[in-house]
Amino acid sequence: MIPAAFEYVRADSVDAALSALTEYGDEAKLLAGGHSLLPLMKLRLAAPSVLVDVGRLDDLRYINDAGDYIAIGALTRHRDLETSSLLASAAPLLAHAAGHVGDPQVRHRGTIGGSLAHADPASDLPAVALAMGATIVATGPNGTREIAASEFYTGFLESALAPDELLTEIRIPKLDTQGWSFQKFNRRAQDWAIVGVATVRANGSTGVGLVNMGSTPLLASAVMDAVKSGANAADAAALANEGTEAQSDINASSEYREHLARVLVRRSLEESGLS
Amino acid sequence: MKITVTVNGVERSGDVEPRTLLVHFLRDELDLTGTNIGCDTSSCGACTIHVEGQSAKSCTMLAAQADGLELTTIEGLANGDILHPMQRCFQENHGLQCGYCTPGMVMAAISLLDENPNPSETDVRIGLEGNLCRCTGYHNIVKSVLACAAESNGASK
């Protein structure tokens, strides 16, 4: 399988990437590690006429302690997240979940920025970003702006990024984590989750993100509200499919996904210490 | 577009379309046909090579993305007639049946031991999650990787 023909532009700086986006507009797609976009292009489900390769922007590959939050450069690879000692102590949910994206070969190339910007509801890291209350930093021709993860996902494979913006940084708040859990249900180790759940209990509240339960990555708001009101794990988890719109596909019916969501949310809440 | 890569220590150039996949460049332009194409959907791992020393699926990279980088393919492992220890361990432990997945398995296994030189059997099975063997010959593949790890750690053969 070979992608449709396109023009290839390698950006050697953020400014060069932004110029290319301004020049080519809607025709252009950004290429980071390529492990979400290239498979779609090979299947001809995506056929951008210009690819702007930002994969060499090594100055966007970092994990830094920025005081109140951990700053992660968009080009940081899953393997970097998985093996970061800073994340292991400050954001263990993210480090752990990154270690379950795809397989080792995918984690060597795929990036957190690419994964979040691709906005695939079946990807693991968007649900983690939602659960942790991450902030996404977008850089455009007029400077940078911050977007809350909860405002970032606008539709299937669509985000709040403007066509001329580049996702440059992810900010993970430093939480006083009491417990966390990542549940990924699939049939083969390397597959996308049929359903996944990311939970973090910290600073007196509980964040629960859902993988593959609708057209966008979702927060399990009903579950979070119930926990806040004092519900136990079983009662809160019974609300896991509220507000979701799970699809039926070759892997599972929507009813089965809803069942999985309730089971996995319960396991996730219990593993993160809620009785 | 013109690209230059260092493959198995040798600088190689070629003229490719931007959409040329790295595995096609290796096989069709550079005649390095040891890297196989299996599923072509980044699931099976048959096309695994090393990019800058780490395992990667060459069916899910553009040749253009590899421009200027160091690549190692299965052809780059042996030193003349002397097999790389991982290749020898696959041979000695019957770590292959039809052999189609073997180049990718060997490349993934070397990358695995680079990152975890002393893996448990579970570590090896999880570490090779990106590689499929249609013969289902996993038992001896895992045995081969464990034998190679033990050998490099100085244990008796």
Image (spheres, coloured by chain):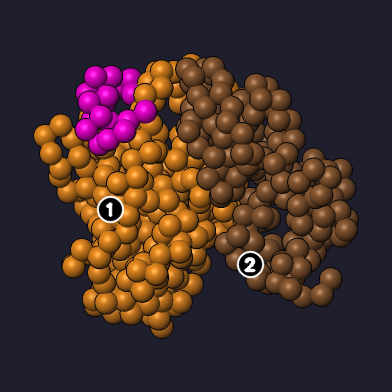
Chain colours: A orange, B brown
Residue A222 in view: no
* Residue A257: image location, x then y, percent: 51, 54
Q: Residue tagged by mark 1?
A: A170
- Label 2 is found on which chain of the structure? B
- Picture quarter containing residue B29? top right
Q: From this viewpoint, which residue is outermost toward the bottom?
A: A275
Q: From this viewpoint, which residue is outermost toward the left?
A: A142
Q: Are marks 1 and 2 in contact (CB under 8 Å)?
A: no
The residue under the point 30% across, 46% down is A59
- Label 1 is found on which chain of the structure? A
* Residue B83: image location, x then y, percent: 80, 50
The residue under the point 81% across, 58% down is B89
Q: CA distance from mark 1 to mark 2?
A: 32 Å
Q: Which residues are magenta?
A: A10-28
Residue A138 horizontal side relative to residue B123, left or right: left
Residue B153 horizontal side relative to residue B4, left or right: right
Could you tell me the amino acid type at mark 1?
Ile
* Residue A211: image location, x then y, percent: 44, 53
Q: Is residue A226 above or below residue B67?
A: below
